Amino acid sequence: MSETRKRSRKRFGGHAHKKHRGARELQVGAQGVLVTCNMNERKCTSEAFSLLNEYADALYGPEQPADTQDSLSEDEEDDEDAEAALKKEVSQIQSSMKTHQQRFSAVDSGAHNVVFIRTHGVDPEQLVHHILSDLYQTKKKKSRVILRMLPVSGTCKAFPEDMEKFLSVFLERWFRAPLRATYQICFKARNSSHSKREEVIKAVAGLVGKLNPLNKVDLTNPELSIIIEIIKTVCCVSVLKDYTLFRKYNLQEVAKEPANQSTGPQEAANQTQEHGDGEKADASAESHNVSAGNGTKEAELE
């Protein structure tokens, strides 16, 4: 009898746990910051929250706590029936909890050594660029385990047709005529086999070329970098400024003194460390030919 009860509790308990975890996973529609680390994800999450909150408070002001709207006067409370007053208070608290969302919340990214911090009411590109800009100027090292912080402005399903539909609209903000810019495409896939690197690069370059044929690829010093990070079935996208200047948004590298920022074995080691699941990172950028605009151009692979 006791064994049967144990089995039932274990079975139903395990099912509930899986359901709860599913609600906290990276999903399509999310915006936030993709943070990579070398092991120790818990410490990475703690450091990420600390950094994001510090700079978000400076940019947007301190986060406001939930307003429970507990504003009934004593006279009003006396006039109301006790049960009705209690129901009203509970309803106000529940309504406030629904409308208030934390500025930052961690969700399961779906990949080892990768943390996803979901943002609410914050522009992730603006915030992360502000962090990197400050670290670049002050050379202050404010993290020990975080390697890179990549803002994610949009997400879609990581299937060719979904990505093409989403990116054709998403990229207009930066590349649609009369806007134009030099750019590179940086691609990384984790725990996914839905999209091939070369095919994604060609498709994205083709979309940028259609938006304005004057958009040109530049692997040396591009004005904008199109970042595509695929984890399982979710494609995370952003368009970043100063990606080369800020050492591919690597917090460890950008805080180094200029004399120590030359590309070398240490940078290659850091880039290799940030990939989990036995994946090998490219120590240097590779280039592949893609068809875009009127001719054949190169787009960067990371």
Image (cartoon, rainbow, N blue to C red):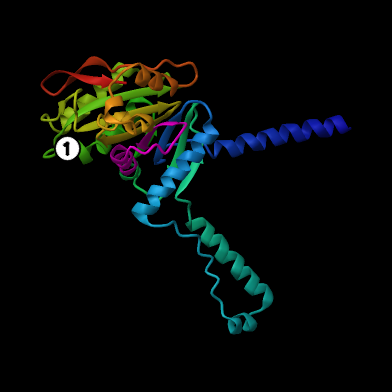
- On the rendered structure, is 41 left or right of 242? right
Q: Kindly tell me whether residue 182 is visible in this rendering.
A: yes
Percent across and percent down for residue 160 are 34, 25
Label 1 amino acid? Arg
Name the residue at 84% across, 31% down. 4
Name the residue at 85% across, 29% down. 3
- On the rendered structure, is 17 left or right of 184? right
Name the residue at 19% across, 33% down. 223
Magenta residue span: 129-151
Q: Kindly tell me whether residue 192 is visible in this rendering.
A: no
- On the rendered structure, is 134 left or right of 142? left
Name the residue at 30% across, 31% down. 257
Percent across and percent down for residue 118 are 44, 42
Percent across and percent down for residue 92 are 55, 66
- Residue 229's image quarter? top left
Q: Is residue 142 magenta?
A: yes
- Residue 22's image quarter? top right
Hey, which residue is sitting farthest right in the picture? 1
Q: Is residue 150 above or below residue 74?
A: above
Mark 1 element type: loop
Give the labeled residue for mark 1: 176
Q: Is residue 77 magenta?
A: no
Q: Quadrant of the C terminus?
A: top left
- Residue 201's image quarter? top left
Q: Is residue 271 above or below residue 82?
A: above
